[in-house]
């Protein structure tokens, strides 16, 4: 995985610089995310290494779906990736782009995994507490994982806060066996 990120980073930096210069960060992020979803589709992913599909056909396919969200520079970027046989790296490029965008916007994306669906009030309390702790604006993504039994697990980049009952039980079991 680290090898893929290393390959994707220069491409992400290049498209980020271009999008920032043209003041199109949000639009480019949306287009790259859509393009990454297209490339990750098993039917399309199988075509990426095929010698029977040209770079022009691949770029036309991805641009045909995601190109409406991209400006001319973004569509050219997809074409460049196809020509360099790097379209398979688009999910990593999109993720790196989002990280750079969040850094510029002084924002952080936080994934909250809870045992049950969160109410709007709970989401706003989590966001307010995290914004105070992290000193950045917070964008929450929520998931439900019933195996947590109760509580929640919060992930913001490298920071993980495990307040789940399952996590507490696991830590207790580790302490008892040590």
Image (cartoon, grey):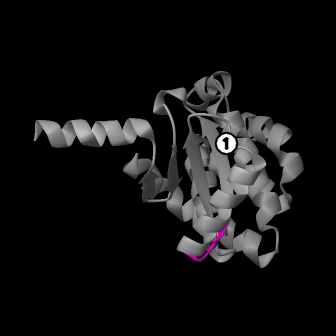
Q: In the depicted view, which residue is nearer to us: 150 or 47?
A: 150
Residue in the picture at 80% in, 38% down: 60
Residue in the picture at 51% in, 61% down: 9
Where is 107 relative to 121, above or below? below
Quadrant placement of the C terminus: top left
**Most extreme residue toward the left, as rendered?**
178
Q: In the depicted view, which residue is nearer to us: 38 or 11?
A: 38
Residue in the picture at 63% in, 26% down: 47
Q: Quadrant of residue 119?
A: top right
- Which residue position is annotated with label 1? 36
**Most extreme residue toward the right, as rendered?**
68
Quadrant placement of the N terminus: top left
Position of residue 63 measured from the top left corner of the image (x, y, whole percent): 80, 43
Q: Is residue 9 left or right of residue 39?
A: left
Where is 171 relative to 122, above or below? above
Position of residue 118 measured from the top left corner of the image (x, y, whole percent): 68, 42
Task: Tell me where the magenta segment starts and ends, as one range.
Answer: 134-138
Q: In the depicted view, which residue is nearer to us: 159 or 31?
A: 159
Residue in the picture at 53% in, 64% down: 10
Q: Secondary structure at mark 1?
A: helix
């Amino acid at each position: 995985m680290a090898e893929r990120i290393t390959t994707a980073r220069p491409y992400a930096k290049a498209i980020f610089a271009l999008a920032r210069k043209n003041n199109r960060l949000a639009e480019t992020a949306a287009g790259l995310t859509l393009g990454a979803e297209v490339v990750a589709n098993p039917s399309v992913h199988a075509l990426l290494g095929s010698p029977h599909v040209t770079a022009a056909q691949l770029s036309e396919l991805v641009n045909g779906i995601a190109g409406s969200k991209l400006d001319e520079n973004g569509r050219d970027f997809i074409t460049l990736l196809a020509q360099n046989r790097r379209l398979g790296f688009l999910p990593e490029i999109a993720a790196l782009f989002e990280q750079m965008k969040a850094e510029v916007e002084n924002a952080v994306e936080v994934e909250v995994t809870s045992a049950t669906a969160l109410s709007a009030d709970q989401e706003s309390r989590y966001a307010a507490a995290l914004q105070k702790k992290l000193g950045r604006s917070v964008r929450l993504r929520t998931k439900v994982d019933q195996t947590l039994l109760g509580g929640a697990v919060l992930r913001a980049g490298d920071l993980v806060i495990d307040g789940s009952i399952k996590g507490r039980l696991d830590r207790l079991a580790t302490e008892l066996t040590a």
